[in-house]
Image: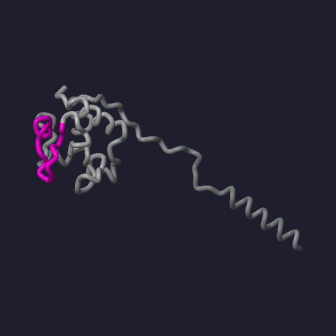
Amino acid sequence: MRALGTYLFTGMIIILSSCSTETGVEPEEKKVNPVKSTYSSISTQIFDQRCSCHHSGQTPGLQSSTAYTNIIGVSNFANTMNYIEPGKPDSSYLFQKIIESGNISGSRMPRDGATTGHLSQVELDSIRTWIENGALNN
């Protein structure tokens, strides 16, 4: 009888260990299109697509026609940093907001990032490079 109990116990362990919640199909990675480190690419691929709050009255306005003049060398109302300080991403308020730096207050941008996903590392790197290269209007 003891042997039967051992076999049943071993069988149950084998059966239970073979159970899994995995489907065997890997989730599809979020596809991120490369973004050139130019203002025009960042404006159309990131600002226009992901910064919708700043198209309807939120400051700074990030509409394609006015975004550049609204953010380059313009002081942020919340602190002494400029939205974009050409050549200095670590001193640029907008960049600090999208990486959720401890140097700024408020939540990480884009605000709907919790549901739609924050900017990818590729997008962040593109913006960083654009700022490091002088944040040109190109």
Question: How far across and down, in percent of the image, does residue 127 sit?
Answer: 27, 36
Above or below: residue 34 compared with residue 49:
above
- What quarter of the picture does the N terminus occupy? bottom right
Q: Give the magenta range.
A: 67-85
Residue name at image x 32 percent, y 39 percent: 124
The quarter holding residue 62 reads: top left
Question: How far across and down, in percent of the image, does residue 17 sit?
Answer: 69, 58
Answer whether residue 53 is magenta in the image.
no
Tell whether 31 sits left or right of 85: right
Question: How far across and down, in percent of the image, does residue 123 sit?
Answer: 32, 37
Q: Nearer the viewer, residue 81 or 20?
A: 81
The secondary structure that most of the magenta stretch takes on is loop
Q: Nearer the viewer, residue 1 or 137?
A: 137
Tell whether 132 sits left or right of 10: left
- What quarter of the picture does the C terminus occupy? top left
Residue name at image x 30 percent, y 28 percent: 36
Tell whether 27 sits left or right of 56: right
Q: Nearer the viewer, residue 91 or 31?
A: 91
Count numbered badges in the picture: 0
The quarter holding residue 64 reads: top left
Residue name at image x 40 percent, y 37 percent: 31
Tell me how the rendering is colored. Answer: one colour
Name the residue furthest bottom: 1
Question: How far across and down, in percent of the image, does residue 32 sit?
Answer: 37, 36
Tell whether 70 sits left or right of 9: left
Answer whether residue 80 is magenta in the image.
yes
